[in-house]
Amino acid sequence: QSVLTQPPSASETPGQRVTISCSGSSSNIGSNTVNWYQQVPGTAPKLLIYRNNQRPSGVPDRFSGSKSGTSASLAISGLQSEDEADYYCAAWDDSLTGWVFGVGTKLTVL
Amino acid sequence: EVHLLESGGGLVQPGGSLRLSCAASGFTFDFYAMTWVRQAPGKGLEWVSVISGSGGSIYYSDSVKGRLTISRDNSENTVYLQMSSLRPEDTAVYYCVKVGVGAAAHAFEHWGQGTLVTVAS
């Protein structure tokens, strides 16, 4: 099972806002930054958010991230059909000395 | 433009060996840590191993420790994953990933397209 906890699925209609949560512990999210990845089916993952809330160039500002304590969240506003994908949170874990991922959240745009 | 091209995947019997390669271009290779992330069919992402830019620091996930070996050749801009004692549960797409630095430290900045490893008899 994954070290970071995410809901397996989420759905919302176009134009609306959706939030995906990611819960960890003091050894990972509690002491390190959180990154988010987007994976459109059949393609390689892509970095979406780094250092909790920073967007790489080219990522629309509809995507935002936040972190508080041992939890983090990804928010997507103004949902578009192209946002339909799997979203993963990840963080370095000091106890495991390696990265840990969430199980992934499959986002459906209704 | 960063480009990562994996090769070496294929079908191998349980207990067998395979070596994956990842040819990198478009960035100063020896400045960046490189990592392997895998994804079993229909499953989520799993971190496998990381090697620092100099090759002096290496870490593995518990699930592969002692069976998979990461290395790099900075003169060839290539990172490798030597896989031995393979098990059916190692079946996955293996992605080669460039790790960020500075503000993007610990972020998996760029991903290759992946290479499929199938362990089956």
Image (tube, coloured by chain):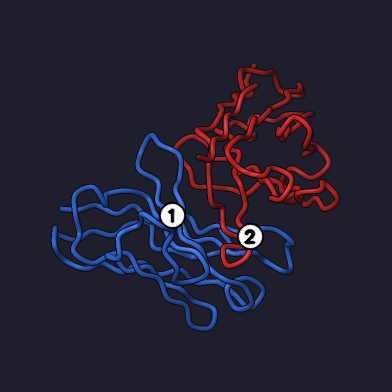
Chain colours: A blue, B red
Q: Residue at 55% across / 57% down in the picture? A: A101
Q: Is residue B112 above or below residue B108?
A: above
Q: Nearer the viewer, residue A54 or B45?
A: A54
Q: Residues within 10 Å of mark 1 (few under 14, many from 20)?
A: many
Q: Nearer the viewer, residue A48 or A108?
A: A48
Q: Amino acid at mark 2?
A: Val
Q: Does A60 sit left or right of A4 as displayed?
A: left
Q: Picture coordinates of residue A71 (x, y %)?
A: 49, 76
**Chain to which the residue tagged by mark 1 belongs:** A
Q: Residues within 10 Å of mark 2 (few under 14, many from 20)?
A: some
Q: Picture coordinates of residue B92 (x, y %)?
A: 57, 33
Return the residue at label 1. Answer: A104
Q: Is residue A68 above or below residue A47?
A: below
- Disc marking residue B66: none
Q: Residue at 48% across / 55% down in the picture? A: A103
What SS does tag 2 mark?
loop
Q: Residue at 53% across / 40% down in the picture? A: B2
Q: Is residue B118 above or below residue B52?
A: above
Q: Mark 1, mark 2: which one is toward the viewer?
A: 2
What SS does tag 1 mark?
loop
Q: Picture coordinates of residue B78 (x, y %)?
A: 71, 32
Q: CA distance from mark 1 to mark 2?
A: 25 Å
Q: Does B120 sit left or right of B52 as displayed?
A: left
- Disc marking residue B101: 2
Q: Amino acid at mark 1?
A: Gly
Q: Residue at 71% across / 46% down in the picture? A: B49
Q: Does A27 sit left or right of B75 as displayed?
A: left
Q: Picture coordinates of residue A56 (x, y %)?
A: 44, 59
Asked where in the image residue A105 lies, by quadrant, the reply is: bottom left
Pointer 1 with pointer 2, Cβ within 8 A: no
Do marks 1 and 2 share a subunit?
A: no
Quarter of the picture holding the N terminus of chain A? bottom right
